Image (cartoon, helix red, strand yellow):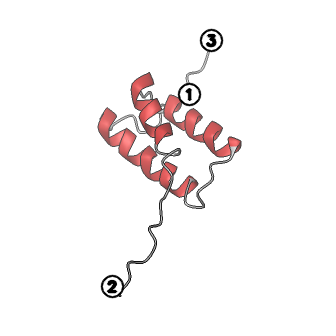
Amino acid sequence: METQEPQLLKDYSENEKAAYLGAIASVASADRVASPEEIQFLTLLSQSAGLTEAAQQEVLGQLRIPLISAPPVPGCT
């Protein structure tokens, strides 16, 4: 008899799961770099949560959004 792993965030909607995992993606890329280990871990979390492929790509896509710092505007402080 095979045991089944519990589903992560099983009582939440797809949108809620993606939002929670998106927050984790934000933390993972706070240093502006997502390591291969962070990407793999977030992928496993997304799969464990039962996200659709599209939702998984949306979550992982948040890792690739570069943080852009605009130069200061002269005269504005």
Disc 2 from disc 3: Cα separation: 67 Å
Disc 2 from disc 1: Cα separation: 55 Å
Q: Is residue 25 left or right of residue 1?
A: left
Number of the label disc, if any, that sits on residue 5: 1
Mark 3 — residue? Answer: 1
56 over 17 or under it: above or below = above
> Which percent across, then down, holds residue 76?
33, 85
How crowded is the residue under tag 3: few (<14 C-alpha within 10 Å), some, or many (20+)? Answer: few
* Mark 2 vs 3, N-terminal side: 3
Mark 2 — residue? Answer: 76
At label 1, which amino acid type do we have?
Answer: Glu
> Which percent across, then down, holds residue 39?
62, 40
Residue 52 appears anywhere in the view: no
Task: Name the image quarter holding the C terminus.
Answer: bottom left
Q: Secondary structure at mark 3?
A: loop
Q: Residue at x 55, y 22 (%)?
A: 4
Query: In this orientation, which residue lies closer to the viewer: 44 or 22?
Result: 22
At label 3, which amino acid type do we have?
Answer: Met
Q: Residue at x 57, y 34 (%)?
A: 43
